[in-house]
Image (tube, rainbow, N blue to C red):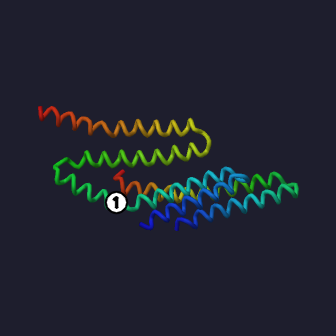
Protein backbone atom coordinates (compact mmCIF):
# COMPACT_ATOMS: atom_id res chain seq x y z
CA UNK A 1 0.00 0.00 0.00
CA UNK A 2 2.61 2.50 1.04
CA UNK A 3 5.18 2.55 -1.75
CA UNK A 4 2.82 2.60 -4.69
CA UNK A 5 1.06 5.75 -3.52
CA UNK A 6 4.43 7.49 -3.65
CA UNK A 7 5.03 6.21 -7.18
CA UNK A 8 1.49 7.26 -8.14
CA UNK A 9 2.08 10.84 -7.05
CA UNK A 10 5.51 10.93 -8.70
CA UNK A 11 3.92 9.62 -11.91
CA UNK A 12 1.21 12.26 -11.83
CA UNK A 13 3.84 14.92 -11.26
CA UNK A 14 6.03 13.80 -14.14
CA UNK A 15 3.00 13.43 -16.44
CA UNK A 16 1.78 16.91 -15.53
CA UNK A 17 5.19 18.46 -16.17
CA UNK A 18 5.47 16.73 -19.57
CA UNK A 19 1.99 17.88 -20.56
CA UNK A 20 2.76 21.40 -19.38
CA UNK A 21 5.93 21.65 -21.45
CA UNK A 22 4.09 20.33 -24.52
CA UNK A 23 1.25 22.80 -24.05
CA UNK A 24 3.70 25.66 -23.48
CA UNK A 25 5.56 24.84 -26.68
CA UNK A 26 2.31 24.70 -28.68
CA UNK A 27 1.42 28.14 -27.37
CA UNK A 28 -1.48 27.23 -25.02
CA UNK A 29 -0.09 28.64 -21.75
CA UNK A 30 -3.41 28.99 -19.91
CA UNK A 31 -4.16 25.31 -20.58
CA UNK A 32 -0.78 24.44 -19.04
CA UNK A 33 -1.70 26.22 -15.81
CA UNK A 34 -5.05 24.40 -15.80
CA UNK A 35 -3.25 21.07 -16.13
CA UNK A 36 -0.90 22.04 -13.29
CA UNK A 37 -3.84 22.94 -11.06
CA UNK A 38 -5.60 19.68 -11.91
CA UNK A 39 -2.54 17.63 -10.97
CA UNK A 40 -2.18 19.50 -7.67
CA UNK A 41 -5.85 18.89 -6.84
CA UNK A 42 -5.61 15.17 -7.63
CA UNK A 43 -2.51 14.77 -5.44
CA UNK A 44 -4.16 16.75 -2.65
CA UNK A 45 -7.13 14.37 -2.71
CA UNK A 46 -4.75 11.44 -2.34
CA UNK A 47 -2.97 13.20 0.51
CA UNK A 48 -6.34 13.72 2.19
CA UNK A 49 -6.86 9.95 2.26
CA UNK A 50 -3.44 9.48 3.85
CA UNK A 51 -4.08 12.21 6.45
CA UNK A 52 -7.45 10.66 7.27
CA UNK A 53 -5.78 7.31 7.85
CA UNK A 54 -3.13 9.03 9.98
CA UNK A 55 -5.74 10.63 12.21
CA UNK A 56 -7.68 7.37 12.53
CA UNK A 57 -4.50 5.60 13.65
CA UNK A 58 -3.71 8.39 16.11
CA UNK A 59 -7.26 8.24 17.48
CA UNK A 60 -7.15 4.50 18.12
CA UNK A 61 -3.58 4.42 19.37
CA UNK A 62 -3.20 7.54 21.50
CA UNK A 63 -6.78 7.54 22.88
CA UNK A 64 -7.51 10.99 21.43
CA UNK B 1 12.97 -6.10 12.20
CA UNK B 2 12.04 -5.66 8.54
CA UNK B 3 10.11 -2.48 9.38
CA UNK B 4 13.48 -0.71 9.45
CA UNK B 5 14.21 -1.75 5.88
CA UNK B 6 10.76 -0.57 4.78
CA UNK B 7 11.25 2.79 6.45
CA UNK B 8 14.67 3.25 4.87
CA UNK B 9 13.37 2.21 1.46
CA UNK B 10 10.37 4.53 1.59
CA UNK B 11 12.57 7.37 2.82
CA UNK B 12 15.09 7.02 0.01
CA UNK B 13 12.43 6.60 -2.68
CA UNK B 14 10.53 9.65 -1.42
CA UNK B 15 13.70 11.76 -1.29
CA UNK B 16 14.75 10.84 -4.82
CA UNK B 17 11.32 11.34 -6.38
CA UNK B 18 10.86 14.60 -4.48
CA UNK B 19 14.11 15.89 -5.96
CA UNK B 20 13.07 14.95 -9.49
CA UNK B 21 9.71 16.62 -9.02
CA UNK B 22 11.18 19.76 -7.45
CA UNK B 23 12.62 21.10 -10.69
CA UNK B 24 9.39 21.16 -12.65
CA UNK B 25 6.60 21.01 -10.05
CA UNK B 26 7.75 22.17 -6.57
CA UNK B 27 4.22 21.99 -5.10
CA UNK B 28 3.92 18.30 -6.03
CA UNK B 29 7.32 17.67 -4.46
CA UNK B 30 5.97 19.10 -1.20
CA UNK B 31 2.87 16.88 -1.44
CA UNK B 32 5.12 13.89 -2.13
CA UNK B 33 7.23 14.61 0.97
CA UNK B 34 4.03 14.90 3.05
CA UNK B 35 2.85 11.48 1.84
CA UNK B 36 6.30 9.96 2.44
CA UNK B 37 6.40 11.35 5.97
CA UNK B 38 2.94 10.02 6.77
CA UNK B 39 3.76 6.57 5.37
CA UNK B 40 6.96 6.36 7.41
CA UNK B 41 5.13 7.50 10.53
CA UNK B 42 2.37 4.92 10.01
CA UNK B 43 4.96 2.18 9.55
CA UNK B 44 6.83 3.10 12.71
CA UNK B 45 3.73 3.65 14.89
CA UNK B 46 2.25 0.23 14.03
CA UNK B 47 4.41 -1.50 16.69
CA UNK B 48 3.50 0.97 19.45
CA UNK B 49 0.15 -0.57 20.42
CA UNK B 50 1.84 -3.54 22.12
CA UNK B 51 4.14 -1.15 24.00
CA UNK B 52 1.18 0.87 25.27
CA UNK B 53 -0.79 -2.21 26.39
CA UNK B 54 2.21 -3.44 28.41
CA UNK B 55 2.61 0.03 29.93
CA UNK B 56 -1.07 0.13 30.91
CA UNK B 57 -0.77 -3.26 32.62
CA UNK B 58 2.34 -1.93 34.38
CA UNK B 59 0.61 1.22 35.64
CA UNK B 60 -2.34 -0.83 36.91
CA UNK B 61 0.01 -2.74 39.18
CA UNK B 62 1.49 0.44 40.60
CA UNK B 63 -1.96 1.73 41.55
CA UNK B 64 -1.51 4.97 39.59
CA UNK B 65 -4.94 6.07 38.37
CA UNK B 66 -5.65 5.59 34.68
CA UNK B 67 -6.43 9.27 33.94
CA UNK B 68 -2.80 10.35 34.37
CA UNK B 69 -1.57 7.71 31.95
CA UNK B 70 -4.19 8.65 29.33
CA UNK B 71 -3.14 12.31 29.56
CA UNK B 72 0.45 11.16 29.06
CA UNK B 73 -0.57 9.25 25.92
CA UNK B 74 -2.38 12.30 24.55
CA UNK B 75 0.69 14.47 25.17
CA UNK B 76 2.88 12.03 23.26
CA UNK B 77 0.36 11.94 20.41
CA UNK B 78 0.13 15.72 20.23
CA UNK B 79 3.92 15.88 20.21
CA UNK B 80 4.19 13.52 17.26
CA UNK B 81 1.46 15.27 15.24
CA UNK B 82 2.86 18.77 15.73
CA UNK B 83 6.31 17.42 14.85
CA UNK B 84 5.00 16.11 11.52
CA UNK B 85 3.11 19.31 10.76
CA UNK B 86 6.01 21.64 11.59
CA UNK B 87 8.30 19.44 9.48
CA UNK B 88 5.98 19.83 6.52
CA UNK B 89 5.79 23.59 7.01
CA UNK B 90 9.59 23.81 7.25
CA UNK B 91 9.81 21.77 4.04
CA UNK B 92 7.56 24.20 2.23
CA UNK B 93 10.00 27.00 3.09
CA UNK B 94 7.89 28.97 5.55
CA UNK B 95 9.89 28.36 8.71
CA UNK B 96 7.84 30.89 10.70
CA UNK B 97 4.76 28.71 10.09
CA UNK B 98 6.70 25.72 11.43
CA UNK B 99 7.53 27.69 14.58
CA UNK B 100 3.86 28.65 15.03
CA UNK B 101 2.76 25.03 14.73
CA UNK B 102 5.30 23.79 17.24
CA UNK B 103 4.42 26.68 19.57
CA UNK B 104 0.76 25.67 19.37
CA UNK B 105 1.74 22.10 20.12
CA UNK B 106 3.69 23.17 23.18
CA UNK B 107 0.73 25.19 24.49
CA UNK B 108 -1.63 22.25 23.98
CA UNK B 109 0.82 19.97 25.78
CA UNK B 110 0.97 22.44 28.68
CA UNK B 111 -2.83 22.43 28.89
CA UNK B 112 -2.89 18.63 28.83
CA UNK B 113 -0.18 18.42 31.49
CA UNK B 114 -2.02 20.53 34.07
CA UNK B 115 -4.05 17.65 35.64
CA UNK B 116 -0.87 15.61 35.98
CA UNK B 117 0.82 18.48 37.81
CA UNK B 118 -2.17 18.87 40.13
CA UNK B 119 -2.11 15.15 40.79
CA UNK B 120 1.59 15.30 41.62
CA UNK B 121 1.18 18.26 43.98
CA UNK B 122 -1.70 16.58 45.81
CA UNK B 123 0.38 13.43 46.12
CA UNK B 124 3.31 15.35 47.63
CA UNK B 125 1.05 17.25 50.04
CA UNK B 126 -0.57 14.01 51.16
CA UNK B 127 2.86 12.51 51.82
CA UNK B 128 4.14 15.47 53.85
Point 27% across, 38% down: residue: B115
Which residue was labeled with disc 1? B49
B103 up-or-down from A30: above or below: above
B113 with respect to A1 (left or right): left
Q: Quadrant of the N terminus of chain B?
A: bottom left
B79 up-or-down from A2: above or below: above
Q: Quadrant of residue B36?
A: bottom right
Point 34% across, 53% down: residue: A63
Residue B73 position in % (x across, y down): 33, 49
B93 with respect to B57 (left or right): right
- Please give the chain letter of the residue carrying mark 1: B
Point 75% across, 54% down: residue: A34
Residue B122 position in % (x across, y down): 18, 34
Give the secondary structure at mark 1: helix
Q: Quadrant of the C terminus of chain B?
A: top left
Residue A44 position in % (x across, y down): 60, 55
A16 with respect to A1 (left or right): right
Residue B74 position in % (x across, y down): 35, 47
* Number of on-image labels: 1
The foreground one among B3 and B65 is: B3
Disc 1 residue crowd, few under 14, some 14–19, many 20+, Cα 10 Å:
few
Amino acid sequence: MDVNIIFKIAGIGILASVICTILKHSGKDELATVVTLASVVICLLMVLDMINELFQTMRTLFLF
Amino acid sequence: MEVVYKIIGVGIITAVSAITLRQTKPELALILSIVGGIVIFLLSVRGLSSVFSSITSLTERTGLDQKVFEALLKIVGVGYLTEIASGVCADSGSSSLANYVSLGGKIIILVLAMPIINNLVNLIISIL
